Structures are given as structure tokens and as C-alpha cells.
Image (cartoon, rainbow, N blue to C red):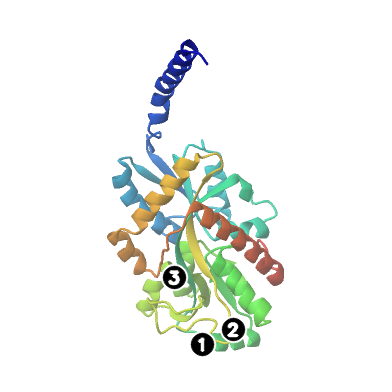
């Protein structure tokens, strides 16, 4: 190659570097650029709503944008999910649901969405489910409750059809204990109150709505559904300790987005939600309600979500649970 050609090639690469450098140096698009809407698939006062509002306060400070909590309850979380999935997938509309989202795709013939339409961002706090009874009911253990259910018709109120408290009772009584018990679905926030008011004698809810009633003596806690006892109610035995070894289930509350949200936004939301959940004020408030959080990535949550969907599909099939 002669000197003239060498100079031409050198000038070409210099020009290429000059022209592409600004594009390569451009920073990632800022997020968020406007208020962020978090659609909560359950009503105010539910555990999902509590988590959303605790996190929303911190995110408003972190993002410098208003975080708007919008409750869209109905059909065990399906309505809120459907609404969120119609939003523009730019990250400015997120939604929070509970583990019911993993149940409903098997429990409902037409939940109104498919898991492929959803981007898992973060598995948020988890909490044991809690089996409670009205203090007038003469039972103090799970085995006594099962014996009573075998001797006479008994009903229980849950946090709603398709929630894990509902599925746990169906599995525990109908599949494992071989005893029928009538399910009465309530909203998550109303289920514990229904047992306090003796509208139903037995309740199955996540812990946050029930803990204040248990501590005040207006509910009697019979068992928690996780493998280990809750630090908030350490004297309450687990279902496994109560005659059903290996029983381990819980409710989780998580963040999702419609498919199409840029990966950079998904990762930022994951990081910022994690930071909000780990702030001292949030940790203290959530721990008091027996809510625990362990950081996870979108990929880890996606893998876990597939496992949860498969697990609850099997429980739905075994128990014969159905939409009332």
C-alpha cells in the first residue's frame, strides 16, 4: 500500500471515530421522566397495597417524580393485571400483584392475561399465611380444628379466591386431611375482620391484616404456613409442626410491567425498588407485619415465577379448587 492510500485509510478511520464517538458517549435515557403509576391489583388496606405505599413514599424521593398508587381490585388481582398490561410499556406504568398471579392462570379458565405478557421485575416481601379462629370457637390447635371440621359443617374466610391463603386451606383440609370445609372469599383487607366479627369462624389470610387482631386477643392464631415460625408471633406453631411435615407456603408481593419495557428500565426499577425496601424506615415497618424481603434480580424472579406457576397448577389440580 503506497503512502497516499495509507493516508486515505487513516483519514477514513479518524472520521469514523469522530462521527461515532458522540453516539457512543450518549448517556442512557433518563427514567422516569414523568409521574410513575403503580397499579395495585388489590384494594386499599390489603398487604399488596401496604407494600406499594411503603415503597412509593421512598421512590418519590428517589426519582424526583410523583409515584401514584392506583388500586384496581377485582377477580383476585386479574382486573388490575389486565389494566396494567394495556398501558404503554415505557416503565411509567408498573403493577403490583401477589402470588395470586401465579395461581390464577390455572384456577381461572380465562384470567384475561398470559404469563408471556408480563415482565417480572422483582419478587418483593414475603409473609407466612396465618390460620386463625374466632375466640369463641373451642379449638386451640390445627388438629383440633380439623377434628371439629370432621364432626360438623365448618366454613372459613380467605383473602380471596385464588390467593395462597385460599389454596393452602384447600390443600390442607381437602387434600391432606380429607375433610370438607366451605370456602367464603373476602377481599384481603376484609377477611380477618370477617372472622373478628364471627361472620365466619375460621380465617386464612396473609399475616399483615391479621396480626393486630391476634395481638389484641380478638383472633386466636392456630398455625402459620411457612416452614419456620414467624418472629412476630413466635408462639404460633407451623402447619408442619402441627402434623403435616414438609408443609411450606407463603404469600409474596411483587413488581411487574407490561411486556416491551426496555431492559435498562427493568433493571433500574429492580435496583430502586430494592433500595426502597431496604431503607431503614421500610424495613422497620414491614418487619412489624412479618414481611421479609431478600434482594433478587429480574432473571432470578422470572425463574422462581415459573416454579411457582407449576407448583400452584398442581395444587389446584389436586385440591379441585375452582372459582366460586
Q: Which residue is mark 2?
A: 244
- Mark 3 burial class by Cα count in 10 Å: few <14, some 14-19, many 20+: many
C-alpha separation, residue under disc 1 versus residue under disc 3: 18 Å
Nearest the viewer among 227 and 7 is 7
**Residue 82 sits above or below residue 9 on the image:** below
Q: Specify which label sits upstream in the sequence, 1 or 3.
A: 1
Q: Tag 2's secondary structure?
A: loop
Q: Position of residue 72 (x, y in %)?
A: 49, 48
Residue at far top of view? 4
Number of marks present in the image shown: 3
Q: Which residue is mark 1?
A: 141
Nearest the viewer among 292 and 106 is 292
Select label 3 or label 2 by which is in front: 2
C-alpha separation, residue under disc 2 versus residue under disc 1: 13 Å
Q: Position of residue 320 (x, y in %)?
A: 71, 69
Select label 2 or label 1 by which is in front: 2
Q: Which residue is mark 3?
A: 207
Amino acid at each position: 500500500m503506497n503512502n497516499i492510500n495509507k493516508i486515505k485509510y487513516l483519514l477514513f478511520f479518524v472520521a469514523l471515530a469522530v462521527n461515532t464517538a458522540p453516539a457512543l458517549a450518549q448517556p442512557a435515557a433518563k427514567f422516569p421522566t414523568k409521574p410513575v403509576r403503580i397499579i395495585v391489583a388489590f384494594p386499599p388496606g390489603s398487604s399488596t397495597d401496604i407494600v406499594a405505599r411503603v415503597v412509593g413514599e421512598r421512590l418519590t424521593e428517589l426519582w424526583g417524580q410523583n409515584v401514584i398508587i392506583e388500586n384496581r381490585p377485582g377477580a383476585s388481582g386479574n382486573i388490575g393485571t389486565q389494566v396494567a398490561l394495556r398501558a404503554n410499556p415505557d416503565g411509567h406504568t408498573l403493577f403490583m400483584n401477589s402470588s395470586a398471579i401465579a395461581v390464577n392462570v390455572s384456577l381461572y379458565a380465562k384470567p384475561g392475561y398470559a404469563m408471556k405478557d408480563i415482565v417480572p421485575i422483582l419478587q418483593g416481601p414475603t409473609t407466612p399465611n396465618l390460620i386463625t379462629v374466632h375466640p369463641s370457637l373451642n379449638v386451640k390447635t390445627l388438629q383440633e380444628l380439623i377434628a371439629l371440621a370432621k364432626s360438623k359443617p365448618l366454613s372459613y374466610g380467605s383473602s380471596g379466591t385464588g390467593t395462597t391463603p385460599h389454596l393452602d386451606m384447600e390443600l390442607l383440609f381437602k387434600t391432606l386431611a380429607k375433610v370438607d370445609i366451605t370456602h367464603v372469599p373476602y377481599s384481603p383487607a376484609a377477611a380477618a375482620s370477617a372472622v373478628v366479627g364471627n361472620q365466619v369462624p375460621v380465617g386464612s389470610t396473609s399475616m399483615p391484616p391479621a396480626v393486630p387482631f391476634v395481638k389484641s386477643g380478638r383472633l386466636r392464631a392456630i398455625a402459620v404456613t411457612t416452614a419456620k415460625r414467624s418472629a412476630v408471633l413466635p408462639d404460633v406453631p407451623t402447619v408442619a409442626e402441627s402434623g403435616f411435615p414438609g408443609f411450606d407456603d407463603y404469600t409474596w408481593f411483587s413488581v411487574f410491567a407490561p411486556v416491551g419495557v426496555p431492559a435498562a428500565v427493568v433493571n433500574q426499577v429492580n435496583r430502586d425498588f430494592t433500595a426502597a425496601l431496604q431503607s431503614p424506615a421500610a424495613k422497620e415497618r414491614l418487619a412489624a407485619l412479618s414481611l421479609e424481603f431478600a434482594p433478587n434480580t429480574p432473571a432470578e424472579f422470572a425463574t422462581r415465577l415459573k416454579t411457582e406457576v407449576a407448583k400452584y397448577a398442581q395444587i389446584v389440580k389436586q385440591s379441585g379448587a375452582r372459582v366460586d
